[in-house]
């Protein structure tokens, strides 16, 4: 059975550090702890405004992940500056995300349909440099198809709408429909030969339905885990998340077997 990987996003360790302009808590220490606790890789988003992760963090995280032989997933906007940083570091993966300065978090997926001509050459240069490129898109079939056509090897499905609806206790019909969008987008991405990841807003409750989607290979989870770390510690929070992911995968056994045989 394919093991679902967990990428831990440590951005918000840097958010806490930056709130006081001190050198702690250190995102690199969090990355080390996350890897020791069972994270398969580390994800960090270098935003254009450097509101959490800094350039120096990326330098240090690249060294740490390389030393530990674990993947660094560099999240970035599609800009010349970010492309140059990605090419300088050559992380295992780069996840292309949309970015608006005024947003609190990445509010929607990258519009690959609209941005196709600008995104395709960036993807090509990153792929040529040996970086595994992912497009972070809404669970929408046209976006998935566009991600394939720009040459990305991976698509990361934005789980934010589904997770938020569950958290806000929206009607079951709505949450079912949002989960169904994720399932359909994952199936289509897999059919197109893309590796399928998912992330944004996932917590202990939503991780199970998401992890049960058989085509998924990786989840990227940050904010909830860093928040939970305040109460129970980062290691135990990651271990609990991993256990829930594995429970969901075990229950999804027959569906997974079908995907693996396709
Ligand atoms: N995946 C992507 C592409 C993201 O931009 C984010 C947020 O930075 C995440 C996953 C993790 O989301 P969260 O912090 O809500 O778990």
Image (cartoon, grey):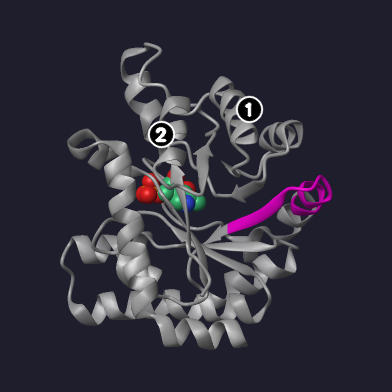
Does the segment drawn in magenta span residue 130? Answer: yes
Please, what secondary structure does the residue beneath circle 2 have?
helix
| Left or right, 253 with reference to 217 | left
Q: Return the residue found at the far top.
A: 22
Q: Quadrant of the C terminus?
A: bottom right
For the question of whether residue 51 can be seen, the reply is: no
Q: Where is residue 79? Give x, y as percent.
A: 67, 39
* Residue drawn 51% across the image and 85% down it: 257
* Residue 234 vertical placement versus 261 (above, below): above
Disc number for residue 63? 1
Tell me: 61 left or right of 27: right
Q: Label 1 neighbourhood size at 10 Å, few (<14), some (14-19), many (20+)?
A: some
Pointer 2 and pointer 1: residues touching (CB < 8 Å)?
Answer: no
| Magenta residue span | 123-135
In the displayed structure, does residue 89 sit left or right of residue 69?
A: right
Q: Earlier in the sequence, mark 2 or mark 1?
A: 2
Residue 115 coordinates in the image, percent (x, y): 66, 58
Task: Name the residue beneath numbered marker 2.
Answer: 33
Mark 2 neighbour density, 10 Å: few (under 14) some (14–19) many (20 or more): some
Disc number lying in front (2 or 1): 2
Which residue lies at the image location 36% right of the left edge and 16% below the top edge?
Answer: 24
**Looking at this view, is 135 or 60 the one in front?**
60
Q: Could you say whether the residue bearing mark 1 is in a helix, strand or loop? A: helix
Q: Is mark 2 within 8 Å of ligand 1?
A: no
Residue 36 x, y percent position in the rendering: 43, 39
């Amino acid at each position: 059975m394919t093991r679902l990987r967990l990428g831990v996003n440590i951005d918000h360790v840097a958010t806490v550090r930056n709130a006081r302009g001190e050198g702690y808590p250190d995102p690199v220490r969090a990355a080390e702890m996350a890897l020791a606790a069972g994270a398969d890789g580390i994800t960090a988003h270098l935003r254009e405004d450097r509101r959490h992760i800094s350039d120096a963090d990326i330098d240090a995280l690249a060294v740490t992940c390389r030393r530990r032989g674990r993947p660094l997933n560099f999240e970035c906007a599609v800009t010349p500056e970010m492309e140059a940083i990605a090419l300088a570091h050559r992380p295992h993966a780069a996840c292309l995300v949309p970015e608006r300065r005024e947003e609190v978090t990445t509010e929607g997926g990258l519009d690959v349909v609209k941005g196709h001509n600008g995104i395709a050459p960036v993807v090509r240069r990153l792929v040529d440099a040996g970086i595994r490129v992912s497009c972070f898109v809404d669970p929408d079939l046209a976006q998935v198809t566009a991600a394939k056509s720009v040459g990305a090897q991976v698509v990361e499905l934005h789980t934010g709408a589904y997770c938020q609806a569950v958290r806000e206790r929206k009607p079951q019909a709505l949450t079912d429909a949002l989960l169904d969008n994720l399932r359909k987008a994952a199936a289509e991405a897999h059919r197109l030969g893309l590796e399928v990841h998912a992330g944004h807003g996932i917590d202990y409750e939503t991780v199970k339905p998401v992890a049960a989607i058989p085509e998924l290979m990786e989840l990227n989870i940050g904010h909830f885990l860093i928040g939970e770390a305040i109460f129970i510690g980062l290691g135990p929070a990651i271990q609990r998340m991993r256990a829930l992911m594995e429970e969901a995968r075990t229950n999804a056994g027959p569906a997974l077997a079908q995907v693996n045989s396709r």
